[in-house]
Image: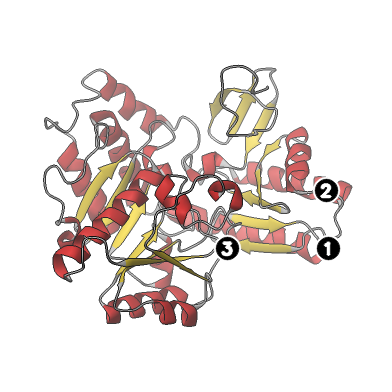
Amino acid sequence: MTHDGPLARNYAPLDVTIAHAEGARVTADDGTSYLDFLAGYSALNFGHRHPALLAAARAQLDRVTLTSRAFGHHLLVPFAAALTDLTRTEMMLPMNTGAEAVESAVKVARKWAHATRDFPSDGGEIVVAQGNFHGRTTTIVSFSDDPLAREGYGPYTPGFRSVPYGDAAALDAAVGDRTVAVLLEPVQGEAGVVVPPDGYLVEARRITSERGALLILDEIQSGLGRTGHLLAQDAAGVRADLTTLGKALGGGIVPVSAVVGRGDVLGVLTPGTHGSTFGGNPLACAVGLAVVDLLRDGTLLARAAALGERLGERLSAMLGDGLLGGVRRAGLWAGIDLPEEAAIDGHELCVRLASAGVLAKDTHGRTIRLSPPLTIDEGDLEAGLDALEVTLREAV
């Protein structure tokens, strides 16, 4: 597959063209079968074409798919109620993509500060973390330190201060009277599944609470079961003022995102101050409600935790054998680093893994992310890890 012709070349995918998918397996147009160990960057937490999600989408397709927010529909309030109940929050703002949810949270935080803390309309600062990935809009790349995402897109949006991720002392020093909010990923996904030190999120919660700033946690990749918890922040025992959700919220069928959190914060929005034609559309709400139903009893969370333990055991053994240079894991989600002396980089490893029947994605040179669906069969998980080990032994 090439990107010649009319398609913009903003991606460089592996040479695999997927024609059919079911659960954790996909089939290419040449008939080759693969195990999906990327799962759409966690957008496919429930696997490809989950029957409950397909049923919800099909039923809604026969009723109404879009009304715009100029009119109401029968699922919008029920979806908001179900999602806030699941996440133990007070209010929900429906959007479409993850980046749109983050942009919305940034806007809401500033609006809240201007309304409640007497900030000037052009004042206030949001503290972010180095190594962050919150999307690729103009505002978001303005506080990215990834040169590929940032360079060439100036002038940049002001009002952000970046500090080292996981460094509570640096965060403490950065948050002051002009700070509107702190925006963090509980686990940095694009950076390579970077897990912060124990107590970091607790300190972030303390610092923001004491200084009167908001804590915004981006759970677009880490949320909805990926870490073995409903939200990654649950493992730390903290509650954000605003949490962004996306990817898995659409079940791999439609783009669905949301900002959930405190009612007094999201309540600063009034008609005309923010909006989205497609946000909270009937089809999105139908799928989102089915996603909530899949997560409600905790079975998938327990499954992710148990399979994640097995993933960790296998990767730790590969690390001990010198096949890997580093391993980081949160539930059924791992970042693995090739040894410094390895003759190949992460992209080449993913090419070789594809030849062995496993699809994964590299990031930042020597790092590969593994995020199979939470519904993956245990035997398929083992088969994929067997292929990874064999590939590493041949390559390292």
Amino acid type shown at disc 1? Gly
Amino acid type shown at disc 2? Ile
Q: Which mark is residue 344?
A: 2
The residue nearer to you, when weighing 311 against 200, is 200
**Looking at the image, is mark 1 or mark 2 earlier in the sequence?**
1
Residue, disc 3: 194
Farthest residue in the front direction?
155
Q: Could you give the CA–CA distance between mark 1 and mark 3, rounded to whole angstroms?
A: 20 Å
x 15%, y 68%: residue: 116
Q: Would residue 270 be found to the left or right of residue 374 on screen?
A: left
Query: Which SS class for mark 2?
Result: loop
The residue nearer to you, when weighing 118 against 44, is 118
Q: Is residue 134 visible?
A: no
- The N terminus, quarter of image: top right
Residue 283 at x, y = what percent?
28, 29
Residue 122 at x, y = what percent?
26, 61
Of circles 1 and 2, the one toward us is 2
Q: What is the quadrant of residue 240 in the picture?
A: bottom left
**Looking at the image, is mark 1 or mark 3 earlier in the sequence?**
3
x 70%, y 28%: residue: 15
Q: Could you give the CA–CA distance between mark 3 and mark 2, rounded to whole angstroms?
A: 22 Å
Amino acid type shown at disc 3? Val
Q: Which mark is residue 322?
A: 1
